[in-house]
Amino acid sequence: MPEISIAPSMLCADFRRLGEQAREVAEAGAQWLHFDVMDGWFVDAISFGPLVIEALRGETELHCNAHLMVGNPTKHIESFARAGADSLFVQRETLTQPAHVLAHIRSLGLLAGLVFNPATPVAGLETIADQLDLVLLMTVEPGTAGQEFMASVLPKIRQTRELLEEFNPEARIAVDGGVDPNTAPELVAAGAEILICGSYLFEHPEGLSAGIESLREAVSGGG
Ligand code: DX5
Ligand code: ZN
């Protein structure tokens, strides 16, 4: 069974105490911190940029992953690298030459990931599969947390898994949107290894640690 990483989405954290929440997430056993960067253009909302990642970088040893939901990601790659991000996700929809952008990210020593919105096909991914480390399949439309998981993306996750098995077995699949203990088992069965999760964890009635624990249990039950 592949190793599953849990990636709490800091968009759903309490912004008044981000450092504390980053430490809490690490203590609770999560592997990644996921940062949703939104520019008010690619998506309507505006969230935060590299300064926030830089500030939190000093609070935790966790892998810091930035999801660039911005119209012109190419312009910002170096500033996220300087901020200390360990990996960058760029949206396929924003790129005419994804291979160049992925190579740029890798050249700065970061893991390079490509994101596909629910309606964006992964056709052609085989031609650049060896140039990426991560693929993120959105299971909601990007832009806001707390949306309902789209089960219609499951076949695309399986398709991506098969394609990566052939063209880059090292690459890992992440999923983002509506992840919780009900949806996570089918996501993992389809081939997801990195579970990005916002509302479920940060709104858990028994707290963040209990949320991470129940998500972990849901995917380690075997089967
Ligand atoms: C959606 C973001 C997600 C979001 C996930 O645009 O990319 O990372 O925070 O939130 P939940 O888990 O609530 O769907
Ligand atoms: Zn995200």
Image (cartoon, helix red, strand yellow):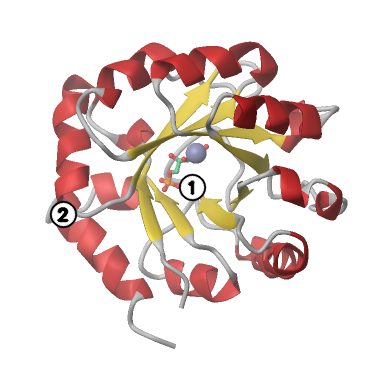
From the image, tell me which residue sits under label 2: 209
Q: Does the residue labelled 2 lie within 8 Å of ligand 1?
A: no
Left or right: 77 as drawn, with respect to 144: right
Residue 147: image tag? 1
Mark 1: which amino acid? Answer: Gln
Q: Does the residue labelled 1 lie within 8 Å of ligand 1?
A: yes
Left or right: 116 as drawn, with respect to 63: right
For this orientation, the residue located farthest to the bottom is 223
Viewer can see residue 46: no
Which of marks 2 and 1 precedes in the sequence? 1
Relative image position of residue 155 (x, y in whole percent): 71, 69
Against 53, is 209 above or below? below
Q: Residue at x 37, y 73 (%)?
A: 219
Against 69, is 207 above or below? below
Q: Judging from the image, what secondary structure is the residue with disc 1 in?
A: loop
Graded by Cα atoms within 10 Å as few (under 14), some (14 to 19) or many (20 or more), the crowding at tag 2 reads some
Mark 2: which amino acid? Answer: Ser
Q: Residue at x 58, y 53 (%)?
A: 139
Q: Residue at x 27, y 23 (%)?
A: 56
Q: Residue at x 22, y 55 (%)?
A: 29
Viewer can see residue 185: yes
- In the depicted view, which residue is nearer to us: 24 or 61? 61
Give the quadrant of the C terminus.
bottom left
Q: Judging from the image, what secondary structure is the residue with disc 2 in?
A: helix
Relative image position of residue 27 (x, y in whole percent): 14, 48
Residue 217: image tag? none
Relative image position of residue 170 (x, y in whole percent): 60, 59
